[in-house]
Each structure stands twice: as C-alpha cells, then as structure tokens.
Image: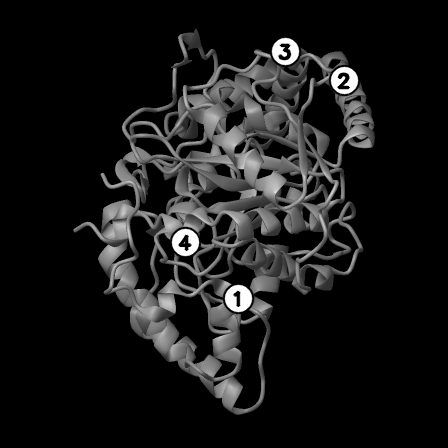
Amino acid sequence: MPTAAPAPAALNDIVAMPAHALSEAIRLRQVSCREVMAAYLAHIDRVNPKLNAIVARRDSDELMREAAERDAQLDAGQWLGWLHGMPQAPKDLTAVRGMVTSMGSPVYKDQVTAHDSIMIERMRASGAIFIGRSNVPEFGLGSHTYNAVYGATGNPYDPSRTAGGSSGGAAAALAARMLPVADGSDFGGSLRNPAAFCNVYGFRPSAGRVPSGPAPEVFLKQLSYEGPMGRTPRDVALMLSVMAGYDARAPLSLSDDPAQFAQPLETDLRGKRVGWLGDWNGYLPMEPGILDLCERALGDLAAVGCEALDYRVPFAGDRLWRMWLVHRHLMVGGQYHALVHDPETRKLAKPALIWEVEGLDGITARQVYQATEERSAWYQTVLRMFEEVDYLAVPSAQVFPFDVNMDWPKQIAGRPMDTYHRWMETVTPWTLAGCPVISVPVGFNAAGLPMGMQLIGPPRGDLAVLQLAHAYGQAQDWVRERPPVALWRD
C-alpha cells in the first residue's frame, strides 16, 4: 500500500466537502438539498457495500422528496439550522421516531421507535434528513462493530479490519465520505476508539453537555454520553452546537449557551502545558508503534505553542479498573437485567451482555458505595492534575485495528486481556472523570492502519479542548492527507 493516497478524481465535490463548507453552500443556495442528497446516495451505493457502515437505509425516493421539501423551505426564506438538508444516519442505539432501533440485537431487530431522543429532536429541528442508521455492536458492547442483525463493519483503510466501536458505523461512514458529520455515544471509548481507527475526530463531551433522555435514559446514562464526530474539529464543534444545551427532562444537563461552539476556534495556545501520560507508567500494554506515533504528534502541538511534558499520574491504574468494573456492571447490567434473566431472550444475547448482568448479580450495595467513593477520589485527583497542566494526552487505543472476524483482542504485547473491554483500558479514566476528550488522528503504522490520541481537558472545558484540536489539525491534517482506500480501490 502506498504511503499516501490522493483523493480519487471521481469523488463528487459535494461529498468531498467538510461539513461546515457544505452547510454554508446549502444556506447560500450554491447547491440544492436535492443535489446533496443525490450525490450522497450515489456515493453510498458505491462505497457502503465494501464497509457495511450504514444499515436500515430508507427508500431513496422518500429521501429525495424530503430533500425537495428542504429546498422549498429555503425558497420560502426558511433555513432551519446548521444541518439543513444534510444527510445523517443516527447511531443504531439512539431513539429516532419512525425508524428501527435494533441496537444490533435480534431481540429488537424489528423494533420501530415511537419517539426521538433529545439529541435527535435537536438534529431534526436543525434540518437533518435521516437516511438510515450507523451500525453498532450488539447493545453497544465492545469496541468492535459487529452483530447478528446487520453483520460487521469494515475499516475504510482496510475493510478486513475492524472500524472500532461502538460508534464504528458512524466513524467508517464519516471517513469514507458517506456522511458529512456524524453522531455517536461513548461509555467505554465509543466515540474515541472508532475515531482513532478510522482517522477522524471523535469528541466525548463533559458530563451533562449533551442531555440524554427522555426517561428512562436520564439516570441510566450517567457515564454514557452522546457526542459528535467529524473530519475537522470545526465540524465537531458545530455539530456540538446543535446537540448541546439544557433540557429540563435531563436534570444534570448543563445550561451554558451552546452557541459558543459555533464561534471560530482560533486561540493563542502559547505556553499551554500538555501532560503526556503515555502508557501510564508502564501499567497499560501497548502494541508497538502506538506510542511513537503519539509522541510525534506531540511535536505538532509544540509547533502551535504548547509545551509537552512527561506526566506521572498520581493514581494507580488497577485501582481505577476495579472501580470501573463496578460502575460498568451497575449501568449495563441493571439496564438489561430482565432481558438476560428471561430464558427466551437470553438465548439471543451476546456473551458480553450476560457477563455484565451476572457481574452485577454478584455485587453488593456496599461495593457500589465504595466504588462511588473511589470515583470521587479520582475526580479530586484529576482536578489537582489540571492545576499543574492545562491539558492531558494519552493514546486513544492500545492496539491498531484488528481482524474484523475477531471478537476482541485476547492479548496485547504478550499480556492477556481478561475481559471483552480490557484492551481499551486507556479510555476508562476519562469516562470516570467526566472530562471532555477528543480523539485526534496521529498517523499510520507501516501497514497503513490509523491511530489516534486523546486530548483531555478539565471538566466543562469543552471549548478549550476543541480549540486545541483545531490548532493541532491546522498543523497536521491527516484526514486530508490520507483518504481511505475505500474511496479509490475497487
């Protein structure tokens, strides 16, 4: 495989546009919504069969009629918002009115949702046209997108490899230019890992930034947040401006004005300190090459004025993992307890789901309380860390994209992995802390497989993290330099 691949001459100008440019072109009537929809549907027809990223597609004639309605609204002087006329494929975990929400499970493969989630309400109000769903692992469990309903999603840089997960369909579709921008969700790295594996940006916002709900998700999703993915940090920020904002149905949601994310991201980063965590003082096993790519990316941060320095985390990694397991069992096991304990639906559940539920069955209330105390101690530690540095940086994954036929990596650098998600331990501390985190592309290994790095800010420092990612992207634009093979190889 060549070290660099130019974008194919046949790639339609519309699908090649970054989302912010496409939105502006639609608003200014430089392209019609019908032209946009036709271009994307033709491109999806050509590329999606290689990747299986977009599933449950809607009828093309219906979509073209909806695009014509968006054009008529513009003719009448009505521009709904930043997503006006833009095709979207919501992640197949979030509720979308009138569409199947299978969650990748045979139990729900025919379930048609009667309501929109809060995030989807906002995307719909901003003018998005929902063309289908982005593929997920069953119930979003595991950072590898495959399920018994739709099958596996391939990586745009090598379709024989995983696209990551659980927002793997979203990341693959975005990287392959089948969507201008995408939504996703993240509990255990589900916006960060697939972004790293597909050479795009994935942003897990601060706790409460994007409200979840309506009920019953309000309290079930205290560690699982919805957020945006894009091919540029500007696209990510603009998508966040649509998703974010207070909603009374989500009592923990933040009241900050989401319009802040629609403003220019340029800022002076001179003197800002970035603490490099690496492999957590040797605690985290890493596949060879990952640390090298991330450390080279630190040089690009230095080029925009930041000072990168080695930072030793004052908290034991195994202590974090123990509290993570309790919280994970509590949130996942509690949500699907009835399904696993029903003999008929249990037969259709993947082993990871059964493991989570049975893990919850063995936990006492005292253990839950102790895990909550431990999480509080970690949060206070994180606050002290941000008194010493402005940002933190750590790899987004501990392995490169692996064989699409593999369930999950059973070892890293010779060290056994004892759970279906242990291989993604690098993301869990920031889930537990509720910090804003963005995965930025950092390049490719010798096999042409992508990797990413997490840039982490203090709680509620979402704008600052996006500004840092924007400056980094200006210094090193891997998305533009290395389009995926799915675009140019037949």
- Secondary structure of residue under mark 4: helix
| Quarter of the figure that contains the N terminus | top left
User: Which comes before the other along the chain, label 1 or label 4?
Assistant: 1
Labels 1 & 3 near each other (Cβ < 8 A): no
Which quadrant would residue 115 be assigned to in this image? Answer: bottom right
Q: Amino acid at mark 1?
A: His
User: Which comes before the other along the chain, label 1 or label 3?
Assistant: 1
In this picture the colour scheme is one colour
**Distance from the alpha carbon under mark 1 to that under mark 3:** 42 Å
Q: Amino acid at mark 2?
A: Glu
**Distance from the alpha carbon under mark 1 to that under mark 4:** 15 Å
Question: What residue is pinned by disc 1?
Answer: 20
| Towards the viewer: 452 or 308 | 308
Residue 374 against residue 293 in the figure, above or below: above
Question: What residue is pinned by disc 3?
Answer: 318
Kindly identify the residue that appears in the image at 69 percent across and 12 percent down.
Answer: 316
Question: What residue is pinned by disc 2?
Answer: 374
Q: Mark 1 or 3, which is nearer the eye?
A: 1
Question: What residue is pinned by disc 4?
Answer: 480
**Whether residue 149 can be seen here:** yes
Q: Mark 4 or 2, which is nearer the eye?
A: 4
Kindly identify the residue that appears in the image at 33 percent across and 27 percent down.
Answer: 402
User: Which comes before the other along the chain, label 3 or label 4?
Assistant: 3
Furthest residue toward left: 490
